Image: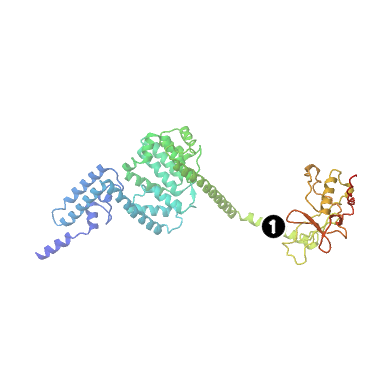
């Protein structure tokens, strides 16, 4: 009996991974609340969550009575906690944020493992996304975030396809096309499948990645049916075409009236080609619902994208030119031969003395009116002038007798002031019309030097009275003052007449 009891105890001790695999069909030891209930990740329908919880509880109650009672009660407790969290908006939001954070860490770890941090090839990209999907990560739901991260990390991702887009952005657009083709029942199924396959070829997506996206979308189709792009397509299909066109242009793709990607998308939406052209005509317009700050940010982003697109085009042109020359080495050989022959001819001309490229130019003959400034002996080459400069001769001074008669009175008063000293004469202002022409110096008049017996100018006393002093320092009489030779002699003082008797 003891052996049988111990055997039953060992059989009853099942690990949590075995319970999930054998009872619920899960291949992971730590599923999320969504995976535990068997609903798609990030499920938003509470009715679907309650239905899935009742189905799981029905399976677990079959093991509640018997040897596995303990494990069944534990799993039932986890299911009840999952339902309480996913049906509470606040708890669900916090749980989703924490779940996405854990998914990011797993995605980064798998990326370093499969892609090794370099620009991955399509095959390695497919392996990486398949590994993420096997871990329970909803790749299609997180596609915009993943592809933006890849595009920012590898700005020089090789472009391919008719639209000229990088592979990550092409996968993102292809996912939206699959969603439109499966959720919008416009036209027959054959036409929708044909349009989706046509977009796959135009975007240059490998078949493996296309199958991965289609499988992921089909798994959570009821979730994608309530996404923004499907809701917008049901109300305004032209807005969806405009949205796809803006996305292609934002990431540097080619968008025009002959865009086959948008033409296939228009066919999925039940639109004609002229509707697509009308939507493309509004690409430069900003959405009406944006605020002023959002419009300014959008315009700044567009300007930045244009600069980045121009740089990317220049880089692509450089790469294409390098590849073209690499495929045609005979052009480089021919150019090298031509340059060698030109160098030989120039060397022969220099050796024969026919051409002297380094000969100094002979100075021009100097004229009496031109002076060449020679560099100083110890001056450096930077200080030496490159070109000679000319110095014009000063014109001869006009003699005093040729001065304009209008200026003679003014100059005469000025000369008398210098010779005699005294107060400043009231000279009339010189007019601009009587100035000498530019480039000539004003005439210089001869000034007569003072006489040998001329005395210094009189000093003014504090009282304002003018006194004159003799040689010995004694005050001199006014009649003893020296006069200028040119000035007329002072008349003798008249003697007072005696009054008549």
Image position of 339 (left or right of 62): right
Residue extending furthest left? 1
Colouring scheme applied when the structure was drawn? rainbow
Looking at this rendering, what residue extends furthest in the front direction? 501
Measured from the top left, where is residue 385 in percent x and y? 75, 59
Left or right of 34, for residue 208:
right
Total of numbered circles in the picture? 1
Q: Residue at x 73, y 60 (%)?
A: 344
Position of residue 309 measured from the top left corner of the image (x, y, whole percent):
52, 47
Residue 494: image x %, image y %? 89, 49
Q: Residue furthest bottom?
A: 378
Quarter of the image with the C terminus in it: top right
Q: Is residue 290 above or below residue 146?
A: above
Q: Position of residue 328 (x, y in %)?
A: 60, 54
Q: Nearer the viewer, residue 192 or 239?
A: 239
- At x 48%, y 34%, the residue is 277
On-image quarter of the N terminus: bottom left
Query: Is residue 163 in view from this perspective?
Result: no
> Compared with residue 267, is residue 151 higher up or lower down, i.e. above or below?
below
Residue 500: quarter of image:
top right
Q: Check disc 1 and report its element: helix, strand or loop.
A: helix
Q: Nearer the viewer, residue 499 or 394?
A: 499
Q: Is residue 270 visible?
A: yes
Mark 1 surroundings: few (<14), some (14-19) or many (≥20) residues within 10 A: few
The residue labelled by disc 1 is 339
- Give the left or right position of residue 296, taking residue 334 as reference: left
């Amino acid at each position: 009996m003891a052996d049988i009891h111990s055997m039953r105890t060992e059989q009853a001790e099942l690990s949590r991974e075995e319970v999930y695999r054998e009872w619920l069909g899960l291949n992971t030891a730590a599923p999320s609340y969504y995976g535990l209930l068997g609903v798609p990740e990030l499920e938003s329908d509470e009715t679907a969550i309650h239905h899935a919880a009742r189905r799981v509880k029905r399976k677990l109650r079959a093991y509640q009575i018997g040897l596995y009672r303990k494990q069944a009660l534990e799993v039932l407790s986890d299911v009840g906690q999952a339902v309480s969290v996913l049906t509470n908006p606040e708890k669900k939001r916090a749980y989703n944020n924490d779940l996405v954070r854990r998914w990011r860490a797993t995605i980064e770890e798998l990326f370093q493992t499969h892609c090794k941090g370099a620009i991955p090839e399509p095959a390695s990209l497919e392996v990486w996304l398949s590994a993420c999907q096997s871990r329970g990560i909803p790749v299609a739901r997180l596609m915009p975030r993943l592809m933006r991260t890849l595009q920012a990390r590898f700005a020089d991702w090789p472009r391919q396809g008719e639209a000229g887009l990088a592979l990550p952005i092409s996968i993102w657009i292809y996912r939206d096309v699959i969603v439109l083709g499966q959720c919008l029942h416009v036209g027959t199924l054959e036409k929708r499948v044909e349009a989706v396959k046509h977009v796959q070829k135009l975007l240059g997506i490998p078949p493996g990645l296309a199958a991965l996206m289609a499988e992921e979308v089909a798994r959570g189709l009821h979730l994608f049916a309530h996404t923004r792009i499907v809701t917008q397509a049901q109300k305004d299909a032209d807005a969806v075409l405009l949205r796809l066109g803006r996305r292609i242009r934002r990431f540097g793709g080619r968008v025009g009236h002959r865009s086959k990607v948008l033409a296939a998308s228009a066919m999925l939406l039940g639109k004609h080609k002229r509707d697509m052209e009308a939507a493309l005509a509004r690409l430069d317009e900003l959405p009406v619902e944006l605020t002023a700050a959002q419009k300014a940010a959008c315009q700044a982003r567009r300007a930045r994208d244009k600069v980045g697109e121009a740089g990317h085009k220049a880089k692509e042109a450089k790469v294409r030119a390098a590849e073209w020359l690499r495929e045609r080495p005979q052009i480089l050989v021919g150019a090298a031969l031509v340059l060698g022959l030109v160098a030989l001819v120039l060397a022969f001309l220099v050796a024969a003395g026919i051409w002297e490229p380094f000969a100094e130019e002979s100075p021009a003959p100097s004229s009496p009116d031109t002076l060449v400034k020679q560099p100083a002996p110890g001056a450096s080459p930077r200080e030496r002038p490159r070109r000679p400069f000319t110095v014009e001769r000063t014109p001869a001074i006009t003699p005093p007798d040729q001065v304009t008669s209008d200026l003679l009175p003014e100059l005469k008063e000025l000369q008398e002031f210098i010779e005699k000293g005294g107060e400043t004469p009231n000279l009339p202002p010189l007019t601009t019309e009587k100035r000498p022409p530019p480039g000539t110096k004003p005439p210089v008049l001869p000034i007569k030097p003072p006489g040998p017996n001329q005395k210094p100018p009189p000093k003014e006393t504090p009282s304002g009275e003018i006194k004159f002093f003799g040689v010995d320092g004694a005050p001199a009489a006014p009649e003893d003052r020296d006069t200028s030779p040119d000035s007329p002699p002072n008349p003798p003082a008249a003697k007072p007449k005696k009054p008549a008797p």
